Image: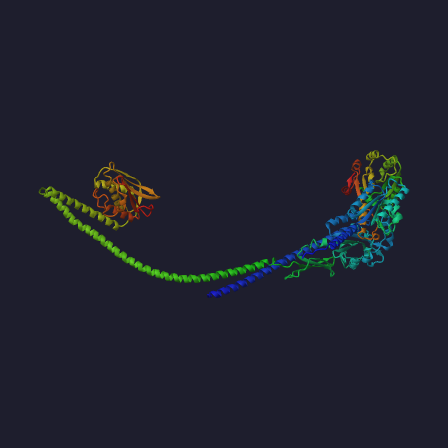
Amino acid sequence: MTYAPKQRLITISTLGILIALLLTGLTLQYEVGLVKKTFSEKTGKMADELKHQFDKINNIDDKLSFLFQVSDHVLDEDFSLQSRSIFPRAPYIKKIIYAPQIRNSHIKSEEEKLQYAGYTGLNFRPFLQSESARSPFSDIIFPVKYIQPYTPYTSLWFGRDIMTYLPVQDMLHSLILEGKKLQISVIKNSPSELYLFSTVTFLNSDNKNNSKNAVSTEDIFGVLGYLIDLNQWLLPVIKNPNIATIATLNNQQFFAQGKLSENNVINITRTELIDFEGQIINLDFHLSKPLTLIDYRIPLLILALSLLLTRLIFFIEKNHIERNKILNEQNSYIEKKVSEKTALLKERTSQLNTAYTHQLAVTRELESFSYSISHDLRAPLRSISTFSQVLKEEYSHLLDDEAKNMLLRVQKNAQRMNLLIDDLLSLAKVSRQTFVYERFSISKLANEQIQNLIERTPTHPFKANITQNLSAKGDIRLMGIALNNLLGNAIKYSSKSEAPSIEFGLTSINAVDVYFVRDNGVGFDMRYADKLFSPFQRLHGDEFEGTGVGLATVQRIINRHSGKIWAESEPGKGTCFYFTLGEDHPPGVGKK
Amino acid sequence: MKIQYHAPARKLNAMIRLFAILLFTLNFPVISANEEKKCLLLMSYHQGYEWNDGIENGVDEKLDGVCELKKIFMDTKRNSSTEFGKRAALRAKSIIENFSPDVLIATDDNASRYVIKPYFKNTGLPVVFCGINWTAQEYSYPYTNATGMVEVAPIIPLLVNIQHSLGNVKHGVYLSSDAMTEHKDFKRYEKEYRERGVHLTPIFVSTMADWKDAYAESQSADFIIINNKAGINDWNSVKLTKFVNQNSNTLTVTNYRWMMPYAMLGMTKSAREQGLWAGEVATAILNGLAVKNIPITVNKTWNLYVNKKLLNNSRIKLSNRILIHAYKSW
């Protein structure tokens, strides 16, 4: 089913946008999921760390409790040593106190002991009014006797009954009466601190945490207290600026860090409950950092890329459609032109064929005519030669000198006519002969032609310098005729030299192989070079024998070899004929 | 449009400016005086006296940059008569009243005895005392306006260290000069040691020869407490150092730094701690903490010394805990 181009474009756009939105939605979902996962991991880690912190405090408390469990008279030095080893490990513990149980009946003697030890004027007393509450115990007190670090501010607690302290009151029930080990107490008006109190009992550790077994006051021989700096305790754990945290204990908020973002499109929260000795601390984590464009960058990038891709495809398709249209138009035009040209070509081809056929016919006719004429001309020539010879032989005694001379001239002209007919036939044959293209030894051919010339036409002695081992490609029979003519001319026209010499060889002109036939004969004026290869043109007249067809024949042969032939000469200094075989020939040669 | 001031107006302007500058300059001392607090350090002894210097250094450290600090040295160590003390007290009182400090620090007993108790008890001037021996009751402390640190010897910590080195000990000797202070000290030692099951035999001597004899006799005890020599006028440190190095077979301990040549183990009080505490309390008072709420406390820091030479010459081995924590070798 094919769609029209416009429909196709609409479909591509629609599909592209839908896919873009889908991908964006999926990516967004993934990104948000990733944020949630990261948030969950981080908050989970924070919660674990806090649980670990609680465990740490438990351990610290166990060790300190043990100190007081094993000895009735714990030296201040030992408490100090133990506490000072705790502070570096738990920098959030700002203060440690211990308040042993003292029965009312022993209060006076204990006070006296302290005073005797140097604490002049010290009396056990309740806390200052602003922080005080009535102790639930009437027969026992828990005066603070150990404090670390001991400063003017912490010393205010020395000798004060911890059971009258408000924050202790808040969790007294579970701390004392249910025997809970560690209890958190939030300090009002002091949002960055809270207290942890612990009972030091005679009971074993199993029973300590068993809320079902209430502990009697006799079993509690002291209360340990820890002032916790929340900034040092929670903040190092909940330190992620992008996560707001609220911690509550018994619905009372005691810690808040970070700000809830109002601009959050996606609300990411998590609640962790930490059970601390039966008290549930609620940690609410909120992703406070609003998701900004940077968080949406990948979905936006996907959207942008998808839309871009859609646009690109749309553009390509549109381009394609337009190009097709143009191509079609061009095709039609081309086809039309091609048809026209083809028709013209056909017509011209037909004309050429006709002309060729006609020409062939004419050529054949001419050749036939030439052959016939030459052949027909030979008969009368033979008669002329024969009868002139008979006259010379049988009737010369009857002829005077002039008549004898005339008879001699008839014979010579007849011979010459014969030669002319031979040469013409030869010229005609060159065009007709089938071209056989092969490699052959041109040096050997040249030698053979010289031998033929010497044997056929005994002539003057001459020196022949034929370069050996030269090869060429072409028709060996036609080249034999050409060399016969060239070498024959060289011998002929050097006959009048003192030391006639001819030369055949190969040279290179402009990187093209060029064969040459050189003689040191009479030479010719280069002004007449253009007539050299025209039939019947004889530059030296009757000075030398010849029909004037030889060079025309040579040219025709060289032409059939797709070569070029030219000559260089100077009167009295000899002539050199150059020729090439094949299409390569030096530029500018053969020009008039 | 440029405003042209008439000549009289210009003059008035200049006068107003000058007046404002004068006003500011004149008030400047008032402003600065109001901002900077004043502290006064009343020292019983003299500068150069080691104990005194220790306290002074502690106070200086804590009050540096906190307030303007003025010091009075009563010099009652070198002039121990009551008359001198009273005269020095009067001079000090005058200075105090003139200086009008925001807080007063009184170091050692004589400052409290001669100055604070008679003239500044329960007044509006906050007082921080330190260096008072054993109890501040003698001076009727605490006052509504006074608190501080009492100086006590580490009786029990010393025993703990003895027990760490020797295990369960039963009998010790308390060797001291025959002075009233030392007798008082012995009572405290004896009471605490008795409560812990250790019998302490006192030997009080007045001469070096007696001291040597007592030392030799005491070698059969589990340990010997070498107390103060003050009062033994023929004390020869060279001879006695040599003597103890040649005749020590039992653990010797002391609470006095200057007795370390003659003892293997020393736990001494820190003068600096007294000064630091006094300075801290003074700062807290300047920052608004009510004096009456701050309980009187005692010193808690001890310098731990070991005399390695003496130990090497005896068969005594101290516990690793002591050797590790020892402040320095004597």
Q: Is residue A125 above or below residue B53?
A: below
Q: Nearer the viewer, residue B265 or A423?
A: A423
Percent x, y of residue B186? 87, 43
* Quarter location, residue A257: bottom right
Examine the rendering and report whether any part of residue B128 can be seen: no
Could you tell me residue B321's position as x and y percent?
A: 77, 43
Residue at the far left in the pictured view: A398
Residue A555, given in percent of the width and then of the height, sits at 27, 47
Indicate whether A64 appears above or below B84.
Answer: below
Q: Measuring 52% from the left and 64% from the top, which residue is drawn there?
A: A14
The answer to whether residue A102 shows anywhere in this view is yes
Q: Nearer the viewer, residue B110 or A129?
A: B110
B215 left or right of A54?
right
Q: Position of residue A133 (x, y in %)?
A: 82, 59
Tell me if residue A123 comes above or below residue B48 in the rendering. below
User: Residue at the location (76% across, 48% down)?
Assistant: A84
Observer-nearest of A422 and B4: B4
